[in-house]
Image (cartoon, helix red, strand yellow):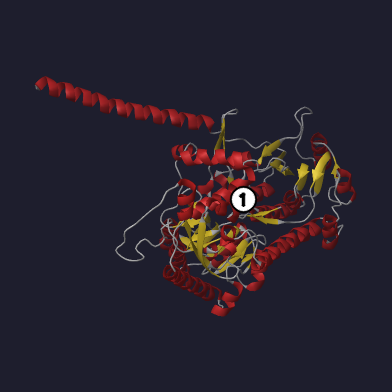
Amino acid sequence: MKNFFNTFGAALLAFVVGTVLMGLLTFGLLSGIGALLMPAQPAVPDHAVLRIDFKTGVVDSPDSQIGTIDMNRMEISMPNTLFQVVTAIQMAAADPRIRGIYIDLDESGSVNMADLEEIRAELVKFKESGKFVVAYGNVYSQTGYWFCTAADRVYMNPEGLLEWKGIAANVMFYKGLLDKLGVEMQVIRHGSFKSAVEPYIMDHMSPANRLQMETLVDALWDTMVADIAVSRPSHTPDVWKQFAEAMAVATPEDALRLGFVDELLYADQVEERVQAEYGGGQSDGKQGMQQISLDKYIAANLMGMHRMSHNRIALIYADGQIVDGESGRNSVGGATLADQIARARRDDAVKAVVLRVNSPGGSALASEVIWREMELCRQQKPVIVSMGGMAASGGYYISSCADVILADRTTMTGSIGVFGMVPNLQKTLRDKVGITVDAVRTNTSADMGSIVRPLSARERLYLQNQVERTYATFVNHVADGRNMTFDQVDAIGQGRVWLGVNARENGLVDGFGGLADALTLAIDRAGIGEDFEVYEIVAEPTPFGTLMSMFSTQAVADRALQNELGVLFRPYLSMRQLLEQEGVMARVPYEVMFE
């Protein structure tokens, strides 16, 4: 027996030691890989040109900075946040090492329309420093061209392409697929414009939905054309629109003749022109002009972007669909965000709060949890909302009580409405795979919401009453926050989506402005002058956690699906997120694809 315990003890000790050593070895190996992949802090050369290409994309929240690994170059590509990009452009304007900015969006990553609008506005301000901004492209999309017209001069490849044909919005409908599968989507909603559920119960737009979509595309087109007419005043907005109607830009020569671009040149010729005309980017005659990418410029100045002060402006992010509980990948947890707002409210060093909202909404209950904390915070210190690409439905719900709401003109907002949706798979299981389900119940509706049977009339009425109660709460919150009556809000509510430019007219937002404007306003409301620090409250992962997130099963699967589905990935993701939700929702679940 004594030998047994000696042997057992030795084996146990060996197991424990081996496990600890293996854990340390694994951690060291992964940490070493992470350190190896992380680039060294770059240096900014003198007489340099800042190159903006957005290859890694732009996101709103640091929590959304999910990197990808380039195994060929052994580098981690990480998207930059809007705050980093805007701050970098502001710093470049005062940086004596930077002569100007060179824009090339041919291989740009994902950037939403509102973020592009804010960055474009910063480029316009950058030119006030006396430094140059030039743009070059082999191919210009309409959005890319609109963005690049902020430049002093726009160049194009002599064999390039410029798209100019107007804006269209496509909504994907799934009813035909669901019919083939035998799936019935049981919908309970409030609002003639709450078209969020239409893709699941119709095969085309309703008249109300068509009206709101026409308003959206017209407002977006007017905004883009007006900006271009200001930057390139050789034509009026009406003339720019006529060019699109006539499909007048068929060749690069057309683009030059009609004033879309200033010259047709190759990239090396543009570099020579920049050096000759602007004195930017001194060259050694072999490597061309000295350039530093936006990513490397941000990395070189990362520490300088955050000043230290005992006066803090808290910057908090609501980036993603709103869900109950804790935040996750691409989601905003009601409990998590409410806790972050509470931290800012209780912190005496925080003098004002800016909430950056980029969300289609989601759980109505989670939105209510966040709204309550926003209301408590507003009672103690200034609260400013900065709306990004989308702040609709639940995204507007959590914004409604702020002291000031700023939106971009291209922000999709409003959608004041709620709905519930329960799929019925009874026919699918029976007819497609031969499965039937039976049940016993203590009460008639004990299994209400089951996906294997239809709702009864009484259950539909019960759920409809829940939807009506939630809608009334939503409208009352907006009415109180915006100093409007219930009827005034209801008239612009009913689930209708508005573009920021229209939301300013109907009172849903206070004015136009980006994240930088919201921070400036918060500083002013706090009365702290130049003595302030922007304090981002985020769930910052450790470097080890960041590395692990790139190898998670869901992340790997999503990257594979995105590569396979292309433009269809976002509608797929939207549908998946919708079906994962339960209860009453305040959300815009379908993807509107502008072309």
| Vertical arrangement, residue 554 with respect to residue 176, above or below | above
Residue positioned 17% across, 21% down in the render:
7
Residue positioned 75% across, 51% down in the render:
142
Residue positioned 82% across, 55% down in the render:
244
| Vertical arrangement, residue 20 with respect to residue 143, above or below | above
Q: Looking at the picture, tell me which residue is in the foreground, 349 or 79.
A: 79
Q: Horizontal and vertical percent for residue 149?
A: 77, 52
- The answer to whether residue 536 shows anywhere in this view is no
Residue positioned 48% across, 72% down in the render:
468
Q: Horizontal and vertical percent for residue 132?
A: 77, 47
- Side of 338 where 56 appears, left or right: right
Q: Looking at the picture, tell me which residue is in the foreground, 225 or 487.
A: 487
| Vertical arrangement, residue 559 with respect to residue 410, above or below | above
Q: Horizontal and vertical percent for residue 58?
A: 61, 47
Query: Label 1 belongs to which residue?
Result: 87
Q: Looking at the picture, tell me which residue is in the foreground, 398 or 467.
A: 467
| Vertical arrangement, residue 67 with respect to residue 30, above or below | below
